[in-house]
């Protein structure tokens, strides 16, 4: 069985209507990234940070998976293929499309955890407020990997990338590390496709660039893979 590994970034979610992480002005939803996506920002103004992610969580519920999400989920039915998605996105659009094997490098909006523990994670069906406490008595916070925090699943993701027969890199600038470094864990004989209208440099030989949005580029490449078998 061949292994298709897919690294997805903000460009995939953007086509469903979720704002990309950082706009051209360096702000995220009109906030300085340092204020809403860092431990220091949370320490300074936890109410602001909780409200910010409560709004992001509500927004994510209002959108639907797009053609890229659906095509990746559908490819799990292709004979002879296993599909693993490694995503930098914190929404659950891959799961809602039907993908069964998804690694969320940067956490998930619909999960939360205590400030006292990185490992005890809970479903987050609604808003988190100041005074919302975990069973251990600690303030609840979003289960999001902020700048300056460790990426706990990066080793798992590297192990997966190392088993890829085909690697799709979709909708990511390849500027955010350690996620961008996963490209270099793929075997030397792995076929690599970078699907993005901005054609980010992959820093690797033999990469095929598909200069299109995810919603058209992903189905096109998957059709090619299926036809080639």
Image (tube, rainbow, N blue to C red):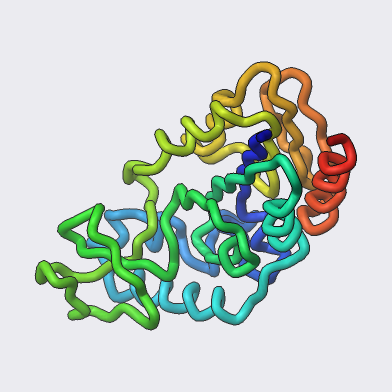
Residue 153: image location, x then y, percent: 39, 42
Residue at point 44%, 62% (across, down): 108
Lateral position of residue 2 relative to residue 199, left or right: left
For the N terminus, give its image quadrant. top right
Report whether 186 appears left or right of 48.
Answer: right
Q: Residue 180: which quarter of the image?
A: top right
Q: Is residue 205 above or below residue 220?
A: above
Of residues 229 and 19, the one drawn nearer to the viewer in this rendering: 229
Query: Which quarter of the figure has residue 205?
Result: top right
Residue 90: percent from left, percent from top: 49, 60
- Taking the spot 64% from the left edge, 76% from the top edge, the residue there is 63
Q: Up-down: is 191 above or below 66?
A: above
Residues 81 and 138: in front is 81
Where does residue 176 sit, x and y in percent of width and height?
53, 40
Q: Front-most of 147 and 169?
A: 169
Q: Residue 20: image x %, image y %?
A: 61, 60
Q: Is residue 123 left or right of residue 71?
A: left
Instruction: Name the image quarter holding the C terminus.
Output: top right
């Amino acid at each position: 069985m061949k292994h298709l590994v897919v690294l997805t970034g903000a460009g995939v979610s953007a086509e469903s209507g979720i704002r990309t992480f950082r706009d051209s002005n360096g702000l995220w939803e009109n906030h300085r990234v340092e204020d809403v996506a860092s431990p220091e920002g949370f320490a300074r103004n936890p109410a602001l940070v909780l409200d910010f992610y409560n709004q992001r969580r509500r927004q994510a519920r209002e959108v639907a998976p797009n053609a890229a999400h659906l095509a990746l989920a559908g490819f799990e039915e292709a004979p002879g293929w296993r599909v693993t998605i490694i995503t930098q996105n914190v929404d659950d659009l891959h799961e809602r499309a039907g993908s069964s094997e998804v690694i969320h490098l940067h956490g998930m909006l619909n999960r939360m955890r205590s400030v006292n523990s990185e490992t005890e994670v809970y479903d987050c069906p609604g808003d988190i407020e100041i005074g919302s406490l975990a069973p251990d008595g600690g303030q609840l916070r979003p289960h999001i990997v902020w700048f300056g925090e460790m990426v706990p699943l990066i080793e798992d993701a590297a192990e997966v990338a190392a088993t890829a027969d085909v690697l799709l890199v979709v909708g990511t600038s390849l500027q955010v590390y350690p996620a961008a470094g996963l490209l270099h864990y793929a075997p030397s004989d792995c076929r690599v496709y970078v699907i993005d209208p901005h054609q980010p440099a992959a820093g690797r030989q033999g990469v095929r660039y598909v200069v299109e949005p995810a919603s058209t580029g992903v189905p096109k490449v998957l059709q090619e893979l299926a036809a080639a078998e």
